[in-house]
């Protein structure tokens, strides 16, 4: 099962109701055969713009993320279910990607151009494109090829 | 007729349509194009045949017959001469007795067999080499595949071990309430930056 991250924007609620909303969401994931890896509370703060959802205008919200694993076929069901919840303003589900492995090549990039591997390749290509040229001071007093 | 036309060509170049009793017809100039049909007024015109008298006809026939007969006799003579030449002369080929012919054939056969044997031995060597190379290639591929599958298995095993280790921290239905309490108690903020010395700069 691939990992997903559910980013929730929740209505401003008193603590017991907030707990029940999160619990409801988590139960929905469990009911669909999912596994919850991590819960994160990103705090209550002002929204970047006013949001009108389920007939109410919101200016502040609680942000919450749930990292979970589930079958990809269940994702649309989950989204639909969370969309019906009136306490959830916004819900986004992202696929959690494996972190890319980067290798530091700064010391190679800092070399003078003539020593850099990519520059040497470019020079090789340019050399390959040059045609062989007749040398005029090679002893013959005429041009031996067709002009 | 043609010669007369050539003689008159110089005159005709000046006057293209020709003189009174003679009309030189130019194909290139003053003629309708080749692809146009016959004119309507000339469509059903039948050209008149020239009359030939009886004695003129017989004379022409006699000349014609004479010519054909003479030519036929010359041709027959030449043909017979060629046949005679081929039968008698031995200029272009060597005449052999049956024994000699048999010996020659046997020699050719032996030479051919020797060639075949030589090529066969070369081919056998080549085929053996190719077979060996193929066996080595297949062996190498098989070993590579084995190695690959082992590596893959190793990777998968490692992943499974990691996931089993992680499973201890997974949140279950029983531990859900506690997890929510802890999460609400510890709000996190990912809005920060780190410099090369490891100092953290918070965004908010």
Image: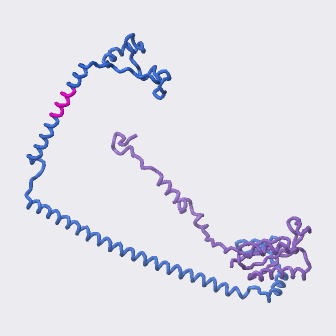
Kindly give the residue lying farthest to the front in the view shown: B54
What x and y, as percent, mark residue A132? 42, 49
Residue A145: image location, x then y, percent? 37, 43
Residue at horizontal 33 percent and vertical 17 percent from the top: B6
Q: Nearer the viewer, residue B42 or A144?
A: B42
**Residue B125 visible, this angle:** yes
Quarter where residue A70 is shown: bottom right
Decide whether residue B66 is among the magenta residues: yes
Q: Image height check: is A6 above or below B68?
A: below
Residue at figure coordinates x 22%, y 27% from the top left: B64
In the image, which lettered chain appears purple? A
Q: B68 or B182, which lies in front? A: B68
Residue A37 in view (yes/no): no
Q: Which residues are magenta?
A: B64-73
Q: Quadrant of residue B194?
A: bottom right
Picture coordinates of residue A28, whole percent (x, y)? 80, 80
* Residue B47 percent across, percent down from the top left: 39, 21
Task: State which chain is coloured blue.
Answer: B
Determine whether B171 is above or below B203 in the image: below
Q: Main secondary structure of the magenta part?
A: helix
Decide if residue B110 is on the left or right side of residue A115. left
Q: Nearer the viewer, residue A90 or B86?
A: B86
Residue occupying the point 8% across, 46% down: B88
């Amino acid at each position: 099962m691939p990992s997903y991250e559910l980013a929730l924007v929740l209505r401003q609620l008193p603590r017991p109701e907030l707990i029940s909303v999160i619990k409801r969401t988590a139960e929905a994931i469990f009911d669909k055969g999912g596994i919850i890896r991590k819960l994160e509370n990103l705090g209550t703060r002002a929204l970047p713009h006013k949001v009108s959802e389920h007939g109410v205008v919101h200016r502040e919200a609680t942000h919450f993320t749930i990292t979970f694993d589930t079958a990809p076929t269940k994702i649309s069901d989950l989204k639909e279910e969370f969309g019906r919840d009136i306490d959830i303003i916004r819900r986004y589900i992202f696929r959690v990607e494996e972190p890319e492995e980067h290798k530091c090549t700064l010391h190679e990039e800092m070399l003078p151009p003539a020593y850099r591997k990519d520059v040497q390749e470019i020079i090789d290509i340019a050399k390959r494109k040059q045609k062989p040229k007749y040398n005029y001071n090679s002893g013959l007093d005429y041009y031996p090829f067709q002009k | 007729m043609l010669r007369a036309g050539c003689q008159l060509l110089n005159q005709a170049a000046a006057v293209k349509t020709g003189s009174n009793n003679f009309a030189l017809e130019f194909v290139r100039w003053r003629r309708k194009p080749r692809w146009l049909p016959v004119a309507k007024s000339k469509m059903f015109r039948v050209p008149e045949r020239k009359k030939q008298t009886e004695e003129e006809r017989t004379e022409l026939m006699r000349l014609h017959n004479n010519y054909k007969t003479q030519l036929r006799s010359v041709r027959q003579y030449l043909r017979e001469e060629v046949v005679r030449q081929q039968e008698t002369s031995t200029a272009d080929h060597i005449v052999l007795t049956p024994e000699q012919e048999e010996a020659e054939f046997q020699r050719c056969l032996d030479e051919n067999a020797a060639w075949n044997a030589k090529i066969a031995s070369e081919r056998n060597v080549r085929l053996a080499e190719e077979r060996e190379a193929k066996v080595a290639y297949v062996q190498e591929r098989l070993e590579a595949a084995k190695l690959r599958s082992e590596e893959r298995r190793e990777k998968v095993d490692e992943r499974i071990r990691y996931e089993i280790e992680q499973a201890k921290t997974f949140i279950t239905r029983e531990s859900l309430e506690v997890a929510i309490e802890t999460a609400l108690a510890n709000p996190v903020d990912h809005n920060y930056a780190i410099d090369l010395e490891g100092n953290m700069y918070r965004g908010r």
